[in-house]
Amino acid sequence: MKKLLLATASAALMASAAMAEVKVGMITTLSGGGAGLGIDVRDGFMLAIEQSGRDDIEVVIEDDQRKPDIAVQLADKMIQSEKVDVLTGIIWSNLAMAVVPASVAQGKFYLSPNAGPSALAGKGCHENYFNVAWQNDNLHEAAGAYANTAGYKNSFILAPNYPAGKDALTGYKRFFGGDLAGEVYTKLGQTDYAAEIAQIRASGADSVFFFLPGGMGISFLKQYADSGVDLPVVGPAFSFDQGILQAVGDAALGVVNTSQWNKDIDNPTNAAFVESFSAKYGRLPSLYASQGFDTANLLISAVDKADVSDADAFRAALEAAEFDSTRGAFKFGPNHHPVQTIYAREVIKEGEVYTNKILGPALEDHADAYAGACKM
């Protein structure tokens, strides 16, 4: 019996030693426009790694400056020189389209904590690509569904002219049952919306839907509030998230927006996440922070079950998604995008802090529209 126990212990030690360290390359936006989004993804991700106490996961972090060419250069460097096993971090869909297909084609795993372009959810899906946030259309589809319940019949819709902007308006139109008073694509990074607001004023619309993430949304909402146009606004969480609301202020109060996450989702993981993130970073977490946190915990759950050098086993471990999400139950659809409930939220003020509260589900157990075209 003693010899058997020694042999078993020896085998366990050898197996532990054989487990390869996982090296993660995080390419995200840490400077310039939209930096707050990347910072939140990074901080949420690293909080989960820290809380796990892992010493077998190394994270290399680089700033893409929201430039596709720099993102491509960084991905090449991470794959060729840094020898990363997994890539993550990209916020913007145009950068994701520049980086993800080439990365997964080289046998690397990509875990998206944000960007979910339709091109990677349907025919362009890949077995090594997982989106932990959503497919781009989803929150906009939920906004369209909410607009129906609110009784809106004639929406003016606008978004930036890049992949996520096109997915946004496509998603809203897919679920909105009314007419369109206008449909406009703005310049990515635009800050002056006087011409668009004039079009809204003259359009005869009874509501406005917009997707303008980061500083674009701050500029639009402030100018819209000052314009005197008094039409209800609906949007996705990206323009009403925690980091943005403080800059927008009263102009955002009462606006209904859609999100798969909020700080008041009632489960122990989310409550602990909100508390620990706030304590560590001195601010409330955002949607992006929750997505970074969930992405890291998905990775950790896979590392616990399989060696990353065994691609089939590691992929199966990711597909199982056996981790405690800030959203509660979490599962992937057949194209490695989440099937999840998306909520309607209202912007409120708690003391001196602008934030959101959940009104209720806008779409429950919702899958994206492109999964049927994914063959893998």
Image (cartoon, helix red, strand yellow):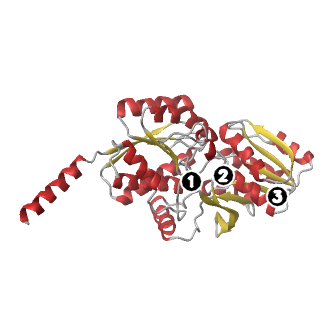
Query: How many numbered tags mark residues here?
Result: 3
On residue 138, the disc is 2
Q: Quadrant of residue 60?
A: top left
Judged left or right of residue 273, residue 205 is: right
Q: Quadrant of residue 86?
A: top left
Of tags 3 and 2, the one toward the viewer is 2
Residue 110 position (above or below residue 268): above
Q: Quadrant of the N terminus?
A: bottom left
Mark before the other along the chain sequence, 1 or 3: 3
x%, y% of residue 144? 76, 54
Mark before the other along the chain sequence, 2 or 1: 2
Residue indicated by mark 1: 338
Question: Badges 3 and 2: C-beta atoms under 8 Å apart?
Answer: no
The structure residue drawn at horizontal position 75% and vertical position 47%, both measured from the top left corner, is 220
Residue type, mark 1 in image: Pro
The structure residue drawn at horizontal position 61% and vertical position 35%, both measured from the top left corner, is 94
Residue indicated by mark 3: 232
- Who is closer to the viewer here, 206 or 200? 206
The structure residue drawn at horizontal position 79% and vertical position 42%, both measured from the top left corner, is 193
On residue 86, the disc is none
Mark before the other along the chain sequence, 3 or 2: 2
- Who is closer to the viewer here, 11 or 196? 11
Which secondary structure lies at badge 1? Answer: loop
Judged left or right of residue 167, residue 15 is: left
Q: Residues within 10 Å of mark 1 (few under 14, many from 20)?
A: many
Residue 179 position (above or below residue 268): above
